[in-house]
Image (spheres, rainbow, N blue to C red):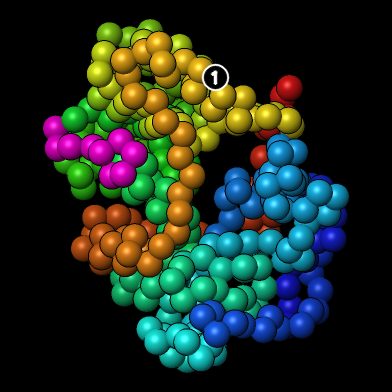
């Protein structure tokens, strides 16, 4: 099969189209013919091996353990393991797999769900990780209630676009923070208010929020605390840029600060599961969450290169 592969860590230039063996599936896995795969910053981190601690976390010290990058996918079931009961060949699915930048990828049955009927396979490929992260951050970590005020930093990004929509579904009053070029996008997703960070600093404003959901980490914890209500909550998903500890440096600072403040502060990493994928499917089909933009392979490579071009390794 054809696949995008990499033998070493590095920029997008280490990616190479080549012929490799079709993966073999375990008893609880599904072989998916991939029609589309998601590309986000997580792919960039694994491709480059940065920040360095992710190598110790199991991705490979000197070179990637997985030859083919990619996790988000949407496609058609080609074969199922002997223990798989929910899917059969021909089913259209979306979710998370291993090595999805290929014609075929294997995925655990519990990390797949039927594709939303109203989304194309290309749109569905962008849902699993970003959508699950936004859902779990708002519902489980922040425990958002109707009428609460939510500030989403990075509202135009992968997780942020889902967070705006899911926040509105949960009944919150949502304010999105983004750049000038994305103001209309964030507003179109249902945000009640949009702050253009190139023109306005929300940490210096009078508004205080019940929740701040931070996908960027550029403002600093103390600055964000000023924008929180005394009993507010701060959930960190993304951190500042860097080769070494980022975003763990901010996470460590947050845990050191927690005992001395009344506001609730937490860091989260999503855990993909079938129940949440099924809920995201229901939200999609009910029109509560819109399909995300899609692009070509060339645009995906440009995106990965762009992450390097924006001074991602500023320290």
Depth order, front residue of 286/48: 48
| Rendering quarter of residue 35 | bottom right
Rate crowding at label 1 as few (under 14), some (14 to 19) or many (20 or more) other CA atoms within 10 Å.
few
The residue positioned farthest toward the left in the image shown: 147
Q: Position of residue 141 (x, y in %)?
A: 34, 39
Quadrant, the N terminus = bottom right
Q: Is residue 72 above or below residue 154?
A: below
Residue 257 is one of the magenta-drawn residues:
no
Query: Which residue is located at x 22 percent, y 27 percent?
Result: 149
Q: Residue drawn at (23%, 37%), measured in percent from left and top? A: 144
**Residue that badge 1 annotates:** 253
Between 251 and 284, which is closer to the camera in this rendering? 251
Q: Is residue 142 magenta?
A: yes
What residue is at 73 percent from the left and 22 percent from the top? 315
Q: In the image, is residue 85 above or below residue 284?
A: below
Residue 108 place in picture, x, y as percent: 51, 73
The residue stretch that appears in magenta: 139-147
76 or 298: which is nearer to us?
76
In-image side of 148 versus 294 (left or right): left
Q: Nearer the viewer, residue 247 or 259?
A: 259
- Whether residue 154 can be seen here: yes
Q: Residue at position x 60%, y 30% from top?
A: 248
Q: Quadrant of residue 265?
A: top left
Residue 156: name its quadrant.
top left
């Amino acid at each position: 099969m054809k696949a995008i592969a990499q033998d070493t860590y590095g920029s997008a230039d280490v990616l190479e189209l080549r012929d490799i063996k079709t993966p073999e599936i375990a008893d609880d896995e599904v072989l998916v013919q991939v029609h589309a795969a998601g590309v986000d910053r997580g792919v960039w981190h694994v491709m480059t091996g940065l920040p360095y601690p992710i190598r110790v976390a199991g991705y490979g010290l000197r070179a990637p353990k997985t030859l083919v990058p990619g996790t988000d996918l949407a496609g058609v079931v080609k074969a199922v393991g002997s223990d798989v009961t929910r899917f059969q060949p021909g089913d259209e699915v979306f979710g998370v797999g291993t090595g999805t930048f290929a014609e075929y990828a294997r995925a655990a049955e519990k990390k797949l769900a039927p594709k939303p009927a109203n989304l194309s396979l290309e749109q569905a490929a962008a849902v699993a990780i970003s959508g699950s992260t936004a859902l779990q951050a708002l519902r489980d970590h922040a425990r958002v209630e109707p009428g609460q005020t939510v500030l989403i930093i990075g509202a135009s990004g992968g997780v942020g676009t889902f967070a705006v929509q899911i926040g509105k579904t949960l009944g919150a009053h949502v304010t999105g923070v983004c750049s000038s070029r994305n103001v209309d996008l964030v507003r179109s997703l249902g945000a009640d208010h949009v702050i253009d960070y190139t023109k306005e600093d929300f940490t210096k404003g009078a508004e205080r929020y019940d929740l701040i959901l931070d996908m960027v980490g550029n403002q600093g914890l103390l600055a964000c605390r000023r924008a929180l209500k005394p009993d507010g909550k701060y959930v960190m998903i993304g951190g500042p840029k860097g080769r070494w500890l980022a975003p763990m440096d901010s996470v460590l600072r947050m845990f050191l600060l927690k005992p001395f403040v009344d506001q609730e502060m937490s860091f989260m990493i999503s855990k993909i599961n079938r129940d949440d994928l099924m809920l995201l499917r229901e939200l999609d089909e009910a029109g509560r969450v819109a399909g995300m933009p899609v692009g070509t392979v060339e645009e995906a490579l440009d995106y990965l290169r762009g992450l390097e071009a924006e001074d991602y390794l500023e320290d």
